[in-house]
Amino acid sequence: MNEVESDSAEHPDESPPPEEPRHGTRLPQRYSVQEVDGRQVLSCTEAPTMAVRIERGLAMPAGKVAEQTAGTIFLDGAAQGPPVKDRHRHLYNLDHHEGCVRAFTLASCEQAMVLILEETDFRLRDWTLFANDPDLDTVLAIWVLLNHVRLSSDAEIRRRVMPLLRLQGVIDAHGLGFEEFCGFPEGLESRTRAKIERLRAEEVEIKQRGGWDELDFASYTAGRLQKIDELVYLTRHFRDVVEVEELARARLANGCLAIACRSEEGIYEVEQRLQELHGDRVGVIALEKAPGVYTLRQVDSSLAADLKVAYDELNLIDSAAGWKSSGDRWGGSAEIGGSPRKSGTRLDPQQIVATLRRTYTPVGLWQRAVSVVRAALGPALVLVSIWGWSLIRREAPSRLFELAAVLLMVALTLLALASRSLPGLFGIRRPRRWRWLRWFLPAAVVAPLGGVANLTWFEAGTTSVPPTLATLLAIAATGAGLEVLLRGVAYGVMARDFPIQEKVGRSFLSWPVVFSSALYVLLAATPLSPFVPFGAGSTAMLILAAVSAAVFGLSAGLVRERSESLGPCIALHWLCSALALFFA
């Protein structure tokens, strides 16, 4: 038996009508409603560039229509004033209400089809569709716009839906009884009117029982759109469609898109499908094949960078990525690659596309300046907290135990806030191989013996007597707090905006290492620091302490950069503290 039933026998003098779908034909559910920024947004899987917002009572004043952002479409009374078609500014008002002579103006659904027939390419930017009431004219207009890819490329689909649009336009302008304006053959007119009545049945029933004012417009519209699908499409129209679920999307510097998606098909089939939906805007694809398993594909070869730079960015922030020689890292060629093979990634789709956007967007001077300021906020907050604590106690906080407690509490709080979404960026991950030890351990160990031991980890006088348990705990807390604050928070804030060793592949002092080391000198070995007792040591001793702190800070920073982990920095600090105690 055929998929459809033909009624050509009833009209022997007419050409056979288009193949009709069976009632209840099972078609994919392409429409969904999600909450975005506290508002319900309706979308279609085949129109990822379009978001529909149906706001009850919306009536944008005519004078403000021209002020709206590009990529805005008002439907059927959502904006006051006459119809607007501004192709240059990508602004449309498909209206059939105020400012219109209804008998001589196309209905909103017909205006939408005119845009399709004029080959308006809705794939080239993102669009927001506004409506205020989901009557049938509005719902049909939404359907046309959300199905623009199929309508613009498939004449058969246009032939199937055009009778619906024309008849609804006549009814919307003139009311019932004027159907002959459509010029349909008798059989086509009766079949199309039956479809209109079927689509309007639920709307009429809801209004008759007085439930329209309490209706969830977005969910109702999604259901009506699915009903239109069942009247227009056949199952064969979706037989060869590659199903792609978009998970996240970000705009790159040149207008291309980075798209994270999920599909059971291969990367090249997905690439072809995304190009159908987005045109030439597809720049980079992150295809999820299983939870945590992604394939990366750079489609646009004209981008300012390639995937090898993206791998470095992703490895920097992905706490699941192992050390470089382990192979369990983001990697591949300049055009295609993937996530860590053994562990998978701990990044979500939003984080992946955000990282890709950073990869292919040049970092400006202003962005780097903001990064430096943000890195300095942590130490500034520590100083404010310590002196604030002194006001509460009404005396200078001279005891090391109190200083360590305030430092560690503030540092851990800042680390928790900064790393809640990207823990790997802030060093909360297993360290890479320990090859860095032979390069940086000697300098880090020798540096504290140059004077920092007498000024940094002890209060004045504690070096002459055996330290108590409280002092030892305070020393450990101070070391951990300083490393968390500087090599964790401050370094992590700057690491994505400045070149570091992993990205470039050669040894050098990066700005995150230098700046975090300078902050360490400020907090550990200068008279401005509350950790240095007032009047402690001569000027020469303070200079020696500052130099020693700088050497240690640079060494610890390089360890942080090479190991990609905060743990070795804390362990190194504790080792140096122990040596300082031994030689004090």
Image (cartoon, helix red, strand yellow):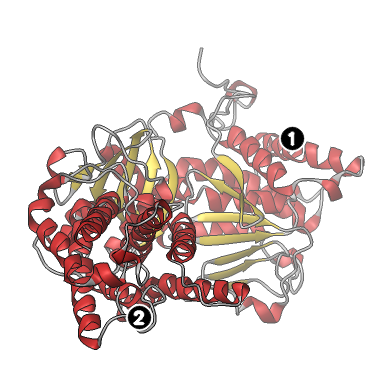
- Name the image quarter holding residue 523: bottom left
Q: Nearer the viewer, residue 82 or 193?
A: 82
Earlier along the polypeptide chain: callout 2 or callout 1? 1
| Disc 2 target residue | 366
| Disc 1 target residue | 198
- Name the image quarter holding residue 190: top right
Separation of disc 2 and disc 1 at Cα?
A: 59 Å
Q: Amino acid at mark 1?
A: Arg
Query: Where is residue 143 drawn, in percent x and y?
Result: 59, 48
Looking at the image, residue 471 lies above or below residue 376: above
- Name the image quarter holding residue 555: bottom left
Q: Is residue 502 left or right of residue 364?
A: left
Q: Nearer the viewer, residue 57 or 412?
A: 412
Residue pictured at 56% horizontal, 25% vertical: 26
Q: What residue occupies the far top of the structure in this picture? A: 1
Query: Where is residue 131 drawn, in percent x and y?
Result: 69, 59
Residue pictured at 45% horizontal, 61% vertical: 401
Q: What residue occupies the far bottom of the structure in this picture? A: 539
